[in-house]
Amino acid sequence: MKARQDDKMKVYVPRDAAAKALGADAVAAAFEAAGAEVIRNGSRGMTWLEPLVEVTRDGTRIGYGAATPADVPAILDGSAETLGPVEEIPFYARQNRLTFQRCGVIDPVSLADYEAHGGLAGLRRAVAMSDAEIVAEVTASGLRGRGGAGFPTGIKWETVRNADGLQKYIVCNADEGDSGTFADRMIMEGDPFCLIEGMAIAGLAVGATKGYIYLRSEYPDAIEVMEAAIRIARENNILGAVLHSEHAFDIEVRVGAGAYVCGEETSLLNSLEGKRGVVRAKPPLPALEGFLGRPTVVNNVISLATIPVIFEKGAEHYASFGLGRSKGTMPIQIAGNVKHGGLFETAFGLPLGELVNDVAGGTASGRPVKAVQVGGPLGAYFAPEKFDTPFAYEPFDGAGGLIGHAGVVIFDDTADMLGMARFAMEFCAVESCGKCTPCRIGAVRGVETIDRIGQGDVSAIPLLVDLCETMKDGSLCALGGFTPYPVMSALEQFPEEFAGAREAAE
Amino acid sequence: MTATAAPSETAEIQAILDKNITLEGPLLPILHDVQATFGCVPDAARAPIAEALNITQAELHGVISFYHDFRREPAGQHVLKICRAEACQAMGANALSDKVLSMLGLDWHGTSADGRITVEPVYCLGLCACGPAAMVNGQVRGRVTAETLVSEVSA
């Protein structure tokens, strides 16, 4: 059946950066030219299908992807090949979407759409609670810092709540620099009110009236959407006098300037103050002496964006997901050489191999998986022998790695592991803030030592191991302290690649 | 650093300072605005910024030079940023950037002699499931090839 000409058809074309990078703007323009009403939603997180166009038919969102402008007429008249109902695509259907429940579903800058899908229910509940009750709810949810450190969010908030100070701050760490991670970007582009609501609840909990989102300059699309959402939130009393209550809270976006280390919380605070992004020694904790020396909550985007659903559905509901002390869900980002890459939010505990092989379908190249790096440039490589490790904080720690911000980067069997180890050291050298010697000098020596090994000098291997020990134990922050993870995990699991030159000579 | 600004520049710098000076931690917003206006942080902007914030020019230089984003000279007409991070490497980013650099006859951070093209490395654009990724004049690009990138910046 053909739609009547005067009956404008609603079409969803994502405005997410990954969709744009794959041509979504041209597709959206073609729909507009054809007279359709285009809604620029966030991404559903199925990157291999982007641009994933959706059309509502009989109340169900039907997907078409990856769409090109040439597909537009056939999509509009219903003759194009379809992916079926988007929420029944197996990759999407088997997720536990809590933090990302609205991402890709709603118009990111429509407050009405946000509210119609459960938005603001959490803030309404929180505004009627005492500060101590709010913190207790977060503690009961078991939420831990999603930026990588996994520190219990409730305990951090309680410290700030009890700290003395006329002015306290909520600082959102949106300096998502880890390769293989894009969850922060996706939620800021796809459901920005969720982050605003989470920060407002944090403000109520600790008595902070001002929030900053430190957003990396590499994310111009996220900056644009966040700025627009903050303006709308101010106009509608979500910010300002929070829901017309006596509580004041406002948010400002601050743009980073291309320094990876500013994702480290103390370095971020220095940068926010207008200084070099150099790491500070702890103590004092930022909770007590943070931004401008005042009590400050520094939380990752995903930690804060998870707060609304905890208050909407209750701490118990959230804590009912997960494994052991890793409660709730984690938006896992599957990237690199991957067939079905994207964002997969699931309860903690899924074995790594199931994620890589079943959910993501292995490599894009069709070649065997050689290793996956979990947790960004500072995360360990996992060879398939370790694929039974459940995706959760403690099991990964026990397996000699970390989940970090939950990026999983897949490599096929052509990967050069010595080269990847060298890159880890090179990256650390480029991005080191320079404050501590193990990181500043160690990373440079690390590159040189790996080059020696690469030239066949295996006597340099013990030197590299020793250097990694020093960096791990002696660095001030995770940049120098965790760079040994990718290096040592590559060395331990692929020793033949570090002895290749000698073997070839023999 | 004795560079002085032309009168019109002085007015623009002053306007940027006036707009941002009451912020908490105003320096990065000031530097971003200056760079958006002039294409770089010109030496002539340093004295007025340092004076307005009551910091030394050495401190200011420390901040400007710490961050990869801030330039002392304007970039080329087209700025091409190619991701060098792990997820893109898994999709052949090293071979891609080698090819782009050789096609353009440039090295990282280089600008072509005619001032048209600047190539820079970037460590992650958050496009890790559609690599190799790049950014052309602020616009994101996924699953790129050397040929499409070079033709886009050469157009």
Image (cartoon, coloured by chain):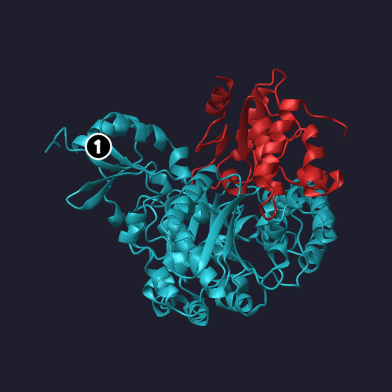
Chain colours: A cyan, B red
User: In the image, A250: left or right of A499?
Assistant: left
Look at the image and tell me in which quarter the N terminus of chain A lies.
top left
In this rendered view, identify the residue nearer to me: A460 or B131: B131
Element marked by disc 1: helix
- What x and y, as percent, mark residue A133? 48, 82
- What x and y, as percent, mark residue B19? 64, 43
In this rendered view, identify the residue nearer to me: A255 or B76: A255
In this rendered view, identify the residue nearer to me: A240 or B97: A240
Q: Is residue A381 above or below residue A53?
A: below
User: What residue is shown with label 1?
Assistant: A75
User: In the image, B83: left or right of B54?
Assistant: left
- What x and y, as percent, mark residue B68? 71, 43
Is residue B114 among the parts visible in the rendering? yes
Residue at the outermost top position: B114
User: In the image, A478: left or right of B132?
Assistant: right
Q: Is residue A93 above or below residue A144?
A: above
The type of residue carrying mark 1 is Ile
Indicate the quadrant where residue B36 lies: top right
Is residue A352 among the parts visible in the rendering? no
Mark 1 belongs to which subunit?
A: A
Q: Residues within 10 Å of mark 1 (few under 14, many from 20)?
A: many
Indicate the quadrant where residue B74 lies: top right
- What x and y, as percent, mark residue A412? 54, 49
Residue name at image x 49 percent, y 69 percent:
A201
* Count of residue discs: 1
